[in-house]
Image (cartoon, grey):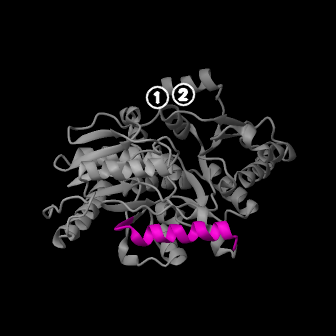
Amino acid sequence: MRIAFDIRRINEFGVGTYTRNIIRALAQRDHENKYFLLGPTEKVAEIGKLPENFKAVALPAADTFRGYMQCRTVLSRLGCDLVHVPHLFWLPRRLPCHYVVTVHDMLEYMYRAHGASNIRRSLHFDLTRMVLKHASRIFAVSCFTKTEVEKLFGINPNKIEVVYNAIDQRFLRGHATDADRQFLAERYQVTYPFLLYAGRISPHKNLVRIIEAFSALKAELLKQDQYHDLKLIIIGDELSKHPDLRRTVVRGGVQNDVRFMGFVPIEVLRIFYDAAKVFVFPSLYEGFGLPPLEAMAHGTPVLTSNTSSIPEVVGNAAVLVNPENVFEMMRALQRVLLDQALREKMRQRGYEQVKKFSWDRSAADVLAGYEEVVGRQAMVVPVPQAEEIRPVKDAR
């Protein structure tokens, strides 16, 4: 097979993580088929060393009409059997080959479920539905996301395959060393016990309630003479973009106990995961949700939501709470902090849960999807048209 993979959004959070890891896994598993990575060629180095059957092909990063036409030309010139777009898009594309698309979540389209009927939004929704209906295969990152695609867009469930995400291999390099913890103390002045949140900072991530629960928790622990120096560390976007969080900190009287770190590289993030007392992730909506698994890989107890895809991902290895109930969140945090038997049980369950997801397994499922799409194409040989690729033999 001749497979194109669109890497133009490789720098984006979430989509970039998926793109890098699924390509790495495909490269380790498949040395037969030919892969063309379409996008800024200088970004291919971020994926790592790739075998000879993977080739970078320059394509403008901007998703403009000109970029679309250049993509059509490149796919036709390369004689590609299919192209994998690793994110949902809304402008229909008449491409010279089949396309498959990965859907991470439906967050952008949830307003439709709540009755919004703005003309522009309706057009955006209807065009997205057309994109999904014309896709040869849809990879959903969870059963929850698959159900959302079916429910919102009326897509045939037989066309949607669940292919789970997995954590980056760098989170599986063992526990932090004494030198790592010394690094936290010297570089970030972290010498105290802390709760941790890591991820994007946006309304659906529920950070306001995390801060409110932490404020209430500090008051309860003070009554019990426990964890006087407990802090909350938030790793994510630049705080200046989210003034509501600073106001919540001031209102809760925890100005000296909440630290916003901004972005940190994976090599540092894994140390924070390892050193945290509890990882807190009460998101209101996730298509998959990798951070809880990343924390579990380091044996850190996880408190997270009982909504969307999260129970599917964390199984019985985390404490689940109603993310809209601050009091419930606070009580659960207190229990996880103080109950050592529970902490140890969560640690062991977390290690086992992480093993259920791997990029190699995901790549095998994606490759099988490619083969089925191209196999169907080979069985029905079309009459050659201008810019149309040659029929191929069944790759299986």
Residue at figure coordinates x 49%, y 55% from the top left: 345
Judging depth in this view, the residue of 126 and 170 nearest the camera is: 126
Measured as percent of width and height from the top left, residue 226 is found at 73, 43
Q: Quadrant of residue 175?
A: top left
Measured as percent of width and height from the top left, residue 73 is found at 33, 50
- On screen, residue 149 versus residue 198, left or right, reads left
Residue at figure coordinates x 33%, y 46% from the top left: 23
Please give the label number shown on residue 177: 1
Image quadrant holding the C terminus, namely bottom left
Count of numbered tags: 2
What are the residue bounds of the magenta stretch?
117-138
Residue at figure coordinates x 79%, y 43% from the top left: 243
Judging depth in this view, the residue of 28 and 219 nearest the camera is: 28
Q: Residue furthest front?
A: 386
Whether residue 307 appears in this view of the structure is no
- On screen, residue 159 versus residue 27, left or right, reads right
Assess whether mark 2 and mark 1 are in contact (beta carbons under 8 angstroms).
yes
Whether residue 127 appears in this view of the structure is yes
Residue at figure coordinates x 59%, y 66% from the top left: 124
Residue type of the residue flagged with mark 1: Thr
Asked if residue 300 is among those painted magenta in the image, a careful observer would answer no
Residue type of the residue flagged with mark 2: Arg
Task: For mark 2, give the secondary structure.
Answer: helix
Q: Which residue is mark 2?
A: 181
What whole-number distance in Å separates the C-alpha atoms at marks 1 and 2?
A: 6 Å
Task: For mark 1, give the secondary structure.
Answer: loop
Measured as percent of width and height from the top left, residue 3 is found at 27, 52
